[in-house]
Amino acid sequence: MAPIIEQLYVEPGIATFEFRDFAFLGDGSVMAAEANRCAADQGKFWEYHDLLMLNLDNPALNGATRETFDALAEHLDLDMAAFGQCMDDRVHQADVEQSRADASARGVSGTPTIALNEEIVTGIQTYGELFDMIEELANQQ
Amino acid sequence: MLRRIPTLLALLVIASMILAACGGDDDDGADDTPATATATSPASGNAEPTATEAETAPTPTEPAGDDATQPDASDDAASTGGIIEPPERAASIPVNGRVLGDPNAPVAIIEYGDFQ
C-alpha cells in the first residue's frame, strides 16, 4: 500500500507517511522490527523497511531469521559490526515492545492498521474509501 | 457463308477459351472470397477484431514479456544474491527518520505494520 500512498499523497506534499511497527506475530516479527531499528540507527530506516517488506517471504532467503537480517544489512552496506552488536544486545527490544503496547492501547489489533491524523481508521473496505478520507481531510485544512 | 463456318468455329473456340480463362479467374475469385470475407468481417463485427487482437497481441508481447522479465529476474538474483530490490523512492520525498514527506503536509498517515 505504501508505494501507492507515497505516489498519490506524499510526493505531492498532501500527506506524510509514517510506519510504526506492531510486532505481534511472534519472535520473527519482533526480531524484524528490532533489525529495522538497528538499521535506522545507521540512517537506513526506510531502505531496510522496504527490503524487509519484500524479502521475508523470499524463497531465496531464510525467512525471519538472523541470517536474513544480516544479509539485508550487508546488502545496504551497513556497518555489520555495529548492526550485529545492536542485534546481539537487543538494543531495541524494549522499543519494539513499547511500540506494540502503545498501538494496542490505541485500539490496534491487527495489521495493517491505518491512522489518519492520529485517528485509527476503521470500517473501510477499499483503498478508494481510504483515499476519499485522505482527500476529505486534506480539503478541510 | 460455308467458308465463314471455320472462322466462326475458331471464334467460338477462342471465346470458349476466354470464358474458360474467366472461369479460372472465378476460381481465383473464389479463393479471394474468404480473404475478402476475412478482411471485411473484422471491420463489420466487433467480436472478431477483439478476438484477433486478443489472440495476436498477447502472443508477441508475452514472449517478449517473458524474455524481458526472466533475464531481469535472473540478473537481479545474480547481482543481489537473491534479494528482491524495492523500487527506488522518489528523491523529492523528504525523509525524517521513520516519517516520509513534507512535515507541513495537512494529513498524517500512519501505518501500523508487522513485517511478517
Image (cartoon, coloured by chain):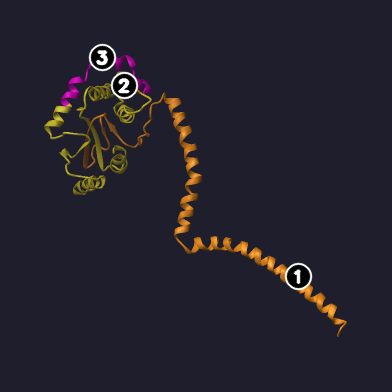
- Give the residue at x 43% y 27%: B77
Q: CA distance from mark 1 to mark 2?
A: 89 Å
- In percent of width and height, residue B71 lies at 48, 32
What's the mark number on residue B35? none
Q: Are marks 1 and 2 on the same chain?
A: no
Q: Which residue is mark 1?
A: B17
- In percent of width and height, residue A74 lies at 36, 20
Query: Magenta stretch?
Result: A69-98
**Chain A, which colour?**
yellow
Q: Which residue is mark 3?
A: A88
Relative depth, front residue between A19 and A12? A19
In the image, what residue type sits under mark 3? Answer: Asp
- In percent of width and height, residue A89 lies at 23, 14
Q: Are marks 1 and 3 on the same chain?
A: no
In the image, what residue type sits under mark 2? Answer: Phe
Q: Residue furthest bottom?
A: B1
Tag in front: 1 or 2? 1
- Label 1: few (<14), some (14–19) or many (≥20) C-alpha neighbours in 10 Å: few
- In percent of width and height, residue B54 lies at 46, 51
Relative depth, front residue between A130 and B28? B28
Relative depth, front residue between B60 and B107? B60
Q: Main secondary structure of the magenta part?
A: helix
Relative depth, front residue between A113 and B50? B50
Could you tell me if the residues under marks 2 and 3 are in contact, i.e. CB atoms within 8 Å? no
In the image, what residue type sits under mark 1? Answer: Met
Q: CA distance from mark 1 to mark 3?
A: 101 Å
